[in-house]
Image (cartoon, rainbow, N blue to C red):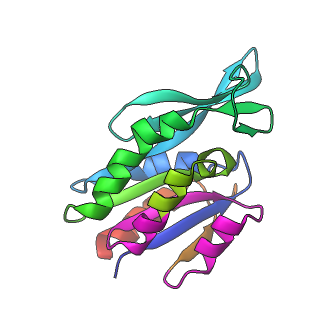
């Protein structure tokens, strides 16, 4: 049975760091997916980038993006999800490689603004591939439904466990 883990935590607790470190601790596995990162100017957060595990990178959301959808003060470029994140996730569902691992950071409001992304996430979690995804701690109909799915393990990321989680998750994936 495939491993399906949601890493839940408050903003800034280290969910992205856990996923990035984990990706380097699973040699021999094909890892696909993406991470997100804040864009800061003069100490203030002004946006977010999306970076795929293959190194492609683009601005996902920014305070200077005027177009909808808007999430808080950020305009979101859903085309970034379509161009960068979705192709590898779709391929992982349609034709998974042996031992493939899908990493998704994050199932947050900006990413979930894309209906195509929500659809692909459903497919990934229904597939036979191992998945580790980060998820916000607040309630949301989409992520709440994922958390209730059979076979999903919810792991809460805290300041106390964030440094040991990557190695613990890698060990679990080696024995799965």
Query: Residue 54, position in %: x, y?
Result: 32, 37
Q: Residue at x 63, y 59 (%)?
A: 135
Magenta-colored span? 122-151
Pick out the residue farthest to the top.
42
Q: Residue at x 75, y 40 (%)?
A: 71
In screen coordinates, is 68 left or right of 105? right
Q: Residue at x 65, y 44 (%)?
A: 110
Image vertical order of residue 18 relative to residue 76, above or below: below
The answer to which quarter of the image holds residue 68 is top right
In screen coordinates, is 4 left or right of 162? left
Q: Quadrant of the N terminus?
A: bottom left
Query: Residue 12, position in %: x, y?
Result: 71, 45
Image vertical order of residue 43 relative to residue 165, above or below: above
Residue 159 seen in the figure: yes
The answer to which quarter of the image holds residue 144 is bottom right
> Of residues 136 and 155, which is closer to you in this image?
136
Query: Residue 132, position in %: x, y?
Result: 47, 62
Query: Residue 125, position in %: x, y?
Result: 44, 70
Pick out the residue farthest to the bottom.
150
> Of residues 65 and 31, which is closer to you in this image?
65
In screen coordinates, is 139 left or right of 127? right
The answer to which quarter of the image holds residue 77 is top right
Q: Residue at x 39, y 62 (%)?
A: 170
Q: Quadrant of the C terminus?
A: bottom left
Residue 26 seen in the figure: no
> Of residues 157 and 112, which is closer to you in this image?
112
Was residue 126 drawn as part of the magenta stretch in this picture?
Answer: yes
Was residue 128 drawn as part of the magenta stretch in this picture?
Answer: yes
Q: How many marks?
A: 0
């Amino acid at each position: 049975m495939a491993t399906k883990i949601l890493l839940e935590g408050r903003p800034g607790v280290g969910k992205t760091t856990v996923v990035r470190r984990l990706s380097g601790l699973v040699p021999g596995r094909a890892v696909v997916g993406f991470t997100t990162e804040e864009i800061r100017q003069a100490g203030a957060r002004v946006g977010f980038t999306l970076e795929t595990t293959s190194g492609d990178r683009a601005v996902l959301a920014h305070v200077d993006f005027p177009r909808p959808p808007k999430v808080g003060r950020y305009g979101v470029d859903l085309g970034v999800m379509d161009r960068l994140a979705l192709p590898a996730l779709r391929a992982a569902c349609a034709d998974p490689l042996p031992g493939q691992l899908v990493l998704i950071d994050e199932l947050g409001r900006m990413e979930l603004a894309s209906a195509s992304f929500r659809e692909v996430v459903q497919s990934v979690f229904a597939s036979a591939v191992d998945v580790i995804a980060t998820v916000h701690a607040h309630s949301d109909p989409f992520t709440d439904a994922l958390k209730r799915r059979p076979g999903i393990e919810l792991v809460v990321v805290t300041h106390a466990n964030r440094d040991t989680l990557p190695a613990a998750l890698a060990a679990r994936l080696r024995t799965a």
